[in-house]
Amino acid sequence: MKDLQSKEFYKITTMKNYIRKFMRLNRKNSEESRYNNPNPPKPELPTGCEYESRRAICVKKIENKDEYLDLLLDADPSKASVDKYLSDSDVYGLQVDKNIVSLAVILHIDKNTLELKNLVTKKEYRGKGYAKKLLKSLCGNYKQKYNKMLVGTSENNIPFYVKQGFDKYEKTIKNYFIDNYDEEIIDGDLHCIDMYYYSKDLKNKEK
């Protein structure tokens, strides 16, 4: 029994030594190959894999507001409505690789309260979370001086804003879209009639 155990131990030890020797030799050959070839081939991804480089993303204040009027009208189709708040508001853009992809219009109500008047993303960039990034960044900056941000929205967009922290219902303005727009406002399958106001507590760290 002891002889059998000794033989097994010898086999295992011999195999471990062989593996160590093989790994040292393989490492040495690899180092010599890199030394002898100053321009070794770059590693390639397996077939079917894609690599997306990190994009340069930043938020910047927009001074030339009128240049983005067409994009703002995608979210608020009444030029008269946009004109009412645009001049008195701050406009910010999310810039991706030097290209503005999302806009947010913020109106200062009083020393404690802001209102999000417009939030829109270019069609080709939608569904990538850029509007969320922009809104989160602005809320993070504004919470230094303000307590609350309001948003007025149609029924379809309530779930989106609630997920962004606008979870306190404030009020409903009946027939808002009928009284303030010349044409019917259609959001998906919904005929917009009432405006629903929700707010976000900017000081709440959990939001």
Image (tube, rainbow, N blue to C red):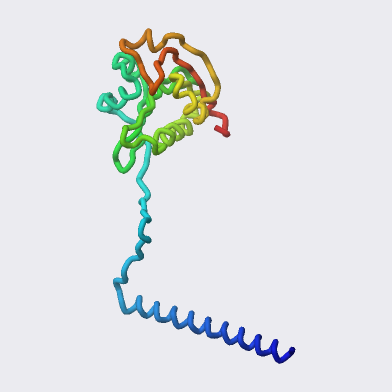
When asked about the image quadrant of residue 76, the answer is: top left
Count of residue discs? 0
User: Is residue 144 at least partly visible in the picture?
Assistant: no
When asked about the image quadrant of residue 51, the answer is: bottom left
The residue that appears at 57% across and 30% down in the rendered structure is 204
The residue that appears at 35% across and 31% down in the rendered structure is 121
Give the x, y percent position of residue 97: 31, 43
Give the x, y percent position of residue 57: 37, 42
When asked about the image quadrant of residue 178, the answer is: top left
Q: Nearer the viewer, residue 46 or 118?
A: 46
Q: Is residue 136 above or below residue 184?
A: below
Question: Which residue appears farthest toward the right when viewing the image?
Answer: 1
User: Is residue 151 at least partly visible in the picture?
Assistant: yes
The residue that appears at 39% across and 12% down in the rendered structure is 177
Give the x, y percent position of residue 44: 35, 63
Give the x, y percent position of residue 63: 30, 28
Q: Nearer the viewer, residue 146 or 163?
A: 163
Q: Nearer the viewer, residue 110 or 171?
A: 171
Q: Is residue 2 above or below residue 154?
A: below
Quarter of the figure that contains the N terminus: bottom right
Q: Answer left or right for 121 relative to 198.
A: left
Q: Is residue 137 above or below residue 86?
A: below
Question: Which residue appears farthest toward the bottom when viewing the image?
Answer: 3
Question: Which residue appears farthest toward the left when viewing the image?
Answer: 67
Quarter of the figure that contains the C terminus: top right
